[in-house]
Amino acid sequence: MELGDLSVCKSIGSLHNSLISNIYSYFTNKYNIDINKNYDEDNDFNYNYSNSTINTNPLDYKVYLDDILRQLNGFDFKSLLIKQLKEKIKDICQNRYNKEWGIEIKGNTIKFNDLLSWGYWGSALDKILLIESALSWLEFGEEMEIPEFNQVRNRYSMRWDEINPCMELGTKKIKSIKFFKNGRMDIKFSSPEIARKFISEWCGYPLIDKA
């Protein structure tokens, strides 16, 4: 195809990459999973400056759908979501360098020590909402918004004095959640068995049973 305006080539390449990006975004947003976007951001369709031509090979969307299915690595979308969520929670509970755990269990209460950092540059919001996702799977068997977490939802930052530090939950398995100014977060469950189930299955904490 002969073309005298290089800007048109750039526009075609931009549209091409935008469509591919939308394919990946559809699946990441619909299923709330992390997948890599495999395409060339600088695609200019091999513009030939000597004769002002470009290679206009048609876009085959199936190539990118196949890539997404490959990245599932044998999991379905729901199973991959749960797997990635568990990995993220383990990552915030265990130091990646010295492998020390920042959590402990006391009866029916799990203490997440030094989990939260309050303020604009803190990471409290993302971590709290990750925990909420895991708790909803434990309680409801699916990802749902727990009403008591609405005070931290859709915010850009959060200071300690802007929240209710003690949340009583009206659910069967989770009794309450407490936030502390020093960054600790406590979750009280309805029984020690459920607390142990959560800390083991969702946090990846290696429980050692007494003989």
Image (cartoon, grey):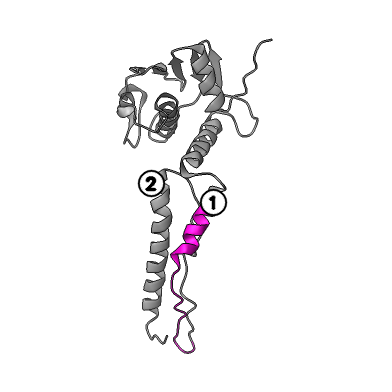
| Gap in angstroms between the C-alphas marked 2 and 1 | 16 Å
The residue tagged 1 is 71
Point out the residue furthest to the right here: 211
Q: In the rendered structure, does residue 63 fall within the stretch colored magenta?
A: yes
- Can residue 60 be seen in the rendering of this structure? yes
Q: Quadrant of residue 141?
A: top left
Q: Secondary structure at mark 1?
A: helix
Near-viewer residue (91 or 98): 91
The percent position of residue 40, horizontal first and vertical second, equals 49, 65
Q: Amino acid at mark 2?
A: Lys
**Residue 190 spot, x, y in % from top left:** 44, 13
Callout 1 amino acid: Gln
Q: Do labels 2 and 1 touch, CB within 8 Å?
A: no
- Magenta stretch bounds: 50-69
**Which of 139 and 21 lies nearest the eye of the viewer?**
139
Which residue extends farthest bottom? 51
Which mark is first along the chain, 1 or 2? 2
Residue 30 is tagged as 2
Give the residue displayed 64% in from the left and 14% down from the top: 209
Within-10-Å neighbours for mark 2: few <14, some 14–19, many 20+: few
How would you rate the neighbour count of disc 1 (Cα within 10 Å): few for under 14, some for 14-19, many for 20 or more?
some
